[in-house]
Amino acid sequence: MVATWSEGLKLRFMGAGRMAESILKGVIRSSLISPSNIRNADPSFDGHDTFTFFGVTILESNSQAYMLDR
């Protein structure tokens, strides 16, 4: 069986710590959610390399993530 992206699913992270990175890697490897449907709200730049490598949108605040999803 080949896994496919679930178009309706969205994933939002608050922060780019180790737990968020681990979840991101698992979701991407299992093809559960398209990287275009994943956002990370984090004003700092720590951990962004992993998120940008996978094509995840990085936002400066949670309110930005909320407004984009409306």
Image: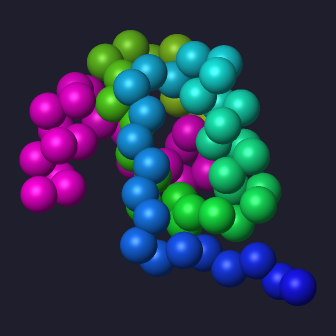
Q: What colouring style does the render use?
A: rainbow
The residue positioned 29% from the left and 36% from the top of the image is 59
The residue positioned 68% from the left and 80% from the top of the image is 4
Q: Quadrant of the C terminus?
A: bottom left
Side of 24 where 63 appears, left or right: left
Vertical placement of residue 66 versus 29, above or below: above
Of residues 53 and 1, the one drawn nearer to the viewer in this rendering: 1
Measured as percent of width and height from the top left, residue 25 is found at 72, 43
Of residues 15 and 43, the one drawn nearer to the viewer in this rendering: 15
Can you name the residue that lies furthest to the right here? 1
Can you name the residue that lies furthest to the bottom here? 1
Q: Which stretch is magenta?
A: 51-70
Side of 66 where 20 appears, left or right: right
Q: Quadrant of residue 45?
A: top left
The residue positioned 83% from the left and 83% from the top of the image is 2
Vertical placement of residue 40 versus 70, above or below: above
Q: Quadrant of residue 8?
A: bottom left
Measured as percent of width and height from the top left, residue 12 is found at 40, 42
Vertical placement of residue 38 versus 24, above or below: below
Q: Quadrant of residue 3?
A: bottom right
**Do we see residue 32 in this rendering?**
yes
Residue 16 among those drawn in magenta: no
**Do we see residue 47 in this rendering?**
no
Number of marks = 0
Q: Quadrant of the N terminus?
A: bottom right
Vertical placement of residue 5 versus 21, above or below: below
Measured as percent of width and height from the top left, residue 61 is found at 22, 26
